[in-house]
Image (cartoon, coloured by chain):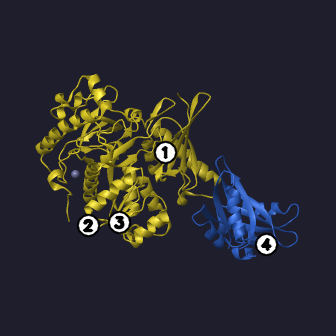
Amino acid sequence: MAITQLSVFLMNQPGALVDAIKAISDANINIRALSIAEANDFGILRIIVSDSDAVCKLLGDQYLFSRTEVVAAKMGDRSGALYPILVVLNEANINIEYMYAFTGSGPEEAYVVFRVNDVKTAEEVLNANGIATLSDDNLKI
Amino acid sequence: MKKYFQPEIETAPREKILEIQNEKIVRQVKHVWDNVPYYRHLMEKQGVTPDDIKSVDDIKKLPFLSKADLRDSYPYGMLGADLKDCVRIHSTSGTTGKRVVAFYTQHDLDLWSDCTARAIVAAGGSEEDVVQVCYGYGLFTGGSGLHDGAHKVGCLTLPMSSGNTERQIQFMMDLESTILCCTPSYAAYIGEALKEQGFQPEDNKLKAGIFGAEPWTEEMRQEIEKSLGIKAYDIYGLTETSGPGVAYECEEQKGMHINEDHFYAEIIDPDTGEVLPEGSVGELVFTSLDKEAFPLLRYRTRDLCVLNRTPCSCGRTHVRMAKPMGRSDDMLIIRGVNVFPSQIETVLLNEGYTPNYQIVLDRERNTDTFDVYVEVAPDQFSDLMSQIQKMEKSLESALRTMLGISPKVHLVAPKTITRSEGKAVRVIDKRKLH
Ligand SMILES: [Zn+2]
């Protein structure tokens, strides 16, 4: 399962982010979640979109990017919802490189995205503990 | 297939070459004395007259010419022929100051294209070949130099000029180019572009490339040979001496044969001007032997180089020059340490990067800042910031080991480092030292 995150190398200069986002919005593709990691000279834009294949085509040879498998775990949009998820991962010795969250379309529906060292195990332990995870098909809206 | 373009000259016995040189130098010095007051004045100051020059052994009595002389005498000061007899000019890019304008009569163009034709035949070219010239055309000598040589050999010549890589690739594939002529950095770039479009090295019909106009390393040669599936030949020349083709590589790929029937080469000590014994590393100096419009006697190239007179297995008898190991004015002094850009290139290739980089020097609080911008290759990219930062750090430490000083490395997106006329801009020095 797991979902596809696109990681895009952006130079730290005016317009770089705007241009990349514009390319995606012009194609009417929904950006479900977004986070940016930044260093002095460059940033890495991490996005989850409704149609990652189409965005890969758009980025084409204009951008340096990669596809990364990440785990999106469903949680209630309320206090204390994240904690049990982290406990499950921790007990399975899953190492989290980075994480961010986005809200879903339903009420009280939120997702937390994990970039982990072992995607397969992470999903198995989450699902075994009754925590739902998303697949790319769930993103197509 | 012809192995030489002008076998009687290219494989002439040494005594014959010397005889040609001795005869030509006497006439060339007389020609300059009669027609170039600027140089005549330099000779008079040194107390030399044409009567003192009886053979190439006497060349060492002549005064040197430097780039500064050519700038001072801009535009007509070095002109050795009537303007009405001149048919073309070329010019240096002028990136380091005032331009140098070189003039050519039809005779000069003919001897220059003989030189480039020899280079093309040495790279395996014949009238069967399709030569794609993607050196810049125009004031730059690269385009027309190789173009005219290819005509002389009878190749089908594609006058592409530089840039528009998509079109270069389309013509290369559709018209089945067999010989590519451009700067080595552009050849590497075309190689990358072909790979990106999903082509394998064996998908093109290229067999050879003739690359020059900028310094490149042995590692870069191997890289290009692999990515294009060709044999890559070096070619040397300067606008001041006519253009590319002063020297060129044969199939041995061990040094470039200097066209000694047109150019006499010396190696001197850059500090004292003294001619150095055979096999020494020093500054390369050229004397033209039969040029009309822009004859230069003892022109200091600033290239540090060594000559090799041992016989070459290709059968050519002309002396070979090594790939210049740096320019005496290319050498950067950073925090008191001598740095050659070619050292940085070597490290990048060893560490798995492309040779696309830019050095930026500046000064902050009386200390040099030293930044190196390097393009990341797609297969090195990671979504993890820590991974990219680790790459920067490890490249910094490899550079420190090679250079003795630490640059700050900045990884940048592919194809973002400035290229002008297909020539990568390697160094930006913002220090105001004068
Ligand atoms: Zn040879």
Tell which subunit mark 1 falls on.
Answer: B
Q: Colour of chain A?
A: blue
Which numbered disc, 3 or 2, marks the residue that appears first in the sequence? 2
> What residue sits right under mark 3 in the picture?
B206
- The local secondary structure at tag 4 comes to loop
Q: Nearer the viewer, mark 3 or mark 2?
A: 2
> What residue sits right under mark 1 in the picture?
B426
CA gap between label 4 and label 1 equals 57 Å
Q: Colour of chain B?
A: yellow
Q: Nearer the viewer, residue B78 or B210?
A: B78
Q: Is residue A56 visible?
A: yes
Residues flagged by tags 3 and 4 on a common chain: no
Q: Amino acid at mark 1?
A: Arg
Tell which subunit mark 3 falls on.
Answer: B
> What residue sits right under mark 4 in the picture?
A130
Residues flagged by tags 2 and 1 on a common chain: yes
Query: How many neighbours does mark 3 have within 10 angstroms: few (below 14), some (14-19), or many (20 or more)?
Result: many
Q: How many marks?
A: 4
Residue A46: image location, x then y, percent: 69, 61
Q: Nearer the viewer, residue B417 or B126?
A: B126
Residue placed at 30% from the left, 27% from the top? B42
CA gap between label 3 and label 4 equals 60 Å
> What residue sits right under mark 2 in the picture?
B127
Q: What label sits on residue B77 in the rendered view?
A: none
Residue B360: image location, x then y, percent: 55, 41
Q: Amino acid at mark 4?
A: Gly
Which numbered disc, 1 or 3, marks the residue that appears first in the sequence? 3
Q: Nearer the viewer, residue B286 or A57?
A: B286
- The local secondary structure at tag 2 comes to loop
